Amino acid sequence: MRNHASAAHPNVEKLTGLKLADWLQTCIREVMQLKTRPVVAEIGRLLHNVKAAALAETELKNAATFFCELPQEQANNLANGLFGIYTPPKADPHVLDNVRLLWPELWPFINEDTRRELGVKLARFRANADKDRADRAKELLELVDGGAAYLPESDRLVEIQETLEDLKRAHQGTNNFYNEPPVARRLRDVVGRHGEVPELLTSPYVATLVDAFLTNNHGVAWSAEPYYIELIKRFDGPQAAYALRSFAFQSIRPKLSGALSQAKWGELVELVAPKLTERGDRVMLELVRAFTGTPDKLSADTKIAAQLKIWREAKGL
């Protein structure tokens, strides 16, 4: 009714007495005579209790057990409800605590469209210079695994850039086997299940990820490697094209003289191969596969160097 007949909302309707009667009939049939389903009542009670007082963790865990039984629409509605009571700047501390405990339990049952809508709401808060609401919304998205992937593009760019810097420091520093895994996991979460990375970060993203995957020639960070493989498998065509030519990157070339990195290079080439569909990329792939020397000498091959030059000129590099 708001969308089609309300003067408070942009519309092209001309409301007449007959149309008003039709809308009244719709209200009676679809709202007033509609019995409240038990699941809707449960959601209403939960939201009321969350706002009313601080709840013990056991109470909230028990309340979360019915999330798996929610119809998709109601899970989405509950997510929007919790999001709505969490983001106001004057929300009581007990409300924030309650929502923070429930949110990770509900997240797996929220569909993709609703997750993206939450990211859009955060973007709107940013656009309206509503910093407090934006910060609260960002807290919720970053609280759950994979939530950072739904941040607005500007936020994701900063998050990915900072995480790449953290991963580079962890990989190059001492105790890298211990320090790399949590950062690698964070990178996976912020990049998201579809591997979407702002185009501006394609080169540093690929270079940093390949650098970590190739190891430091002292050993494989076994707990971090599954994340690296998962992210490489999410490469799109352009990212895979960068990875294939990463033997020429200043940050990559020196380590390719080591035996372990050379072995990992072979694995990398086969991981990205299925993603290369452009003719120039396929030509380069066959040249790299056919090369009989060690990968640190790839740039010295005349045919490979010629293909590399063509690609760089096309990219404006």
Image (cartoon, rainbow, N blue to C red):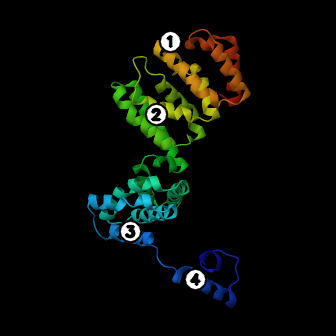
Q: Is residue 134 visible?
A: yes
Instruction: Find disc 2 in the rendering and name its residue.
Output: 227
| Sequence order check, earlier mark of 2 and 3 | 3
Disc 4 marks which amino acid? Arg
| Sequence order check, earlier mark of 4 and 3 | 4
Q: Nearer the viewer, mark 4 or mark 1?
A: 4
Indicate left or right for 78 with 205 as reference.
Answer: left
Label 1 – label 3 distance at C-alpha: 60 Å
Instruction: Find disc 4 in the rendering and name its residue.
Output: 29
Residue 124 versus residue 257: which sits nearer the camera? 257
Disc 2 marks which amino acid? Tyr
SS at mark 4 in the image: helix
The percent position of residue 200, horizontal first and vertical second, equals: 59, 38
Disc 3 marks which amino acid? Leu
SS at mark 2 in the image: helix
Please tell me which residue is depicted at 69% across the width and 24% down the height of the picture. 282
Contact between marks 4 and 1 (CB within 8 A): the answer is no
SS at mark 1 in the image: helix
Label 4 – label 1 distance at C-alpha: 75 Å
Position of 25 relative to 300 (above/below) = below
Contact between marks 4 and 3 (CB within 8 A): the answer is no
Disc 1 marks which amino acid? Ser
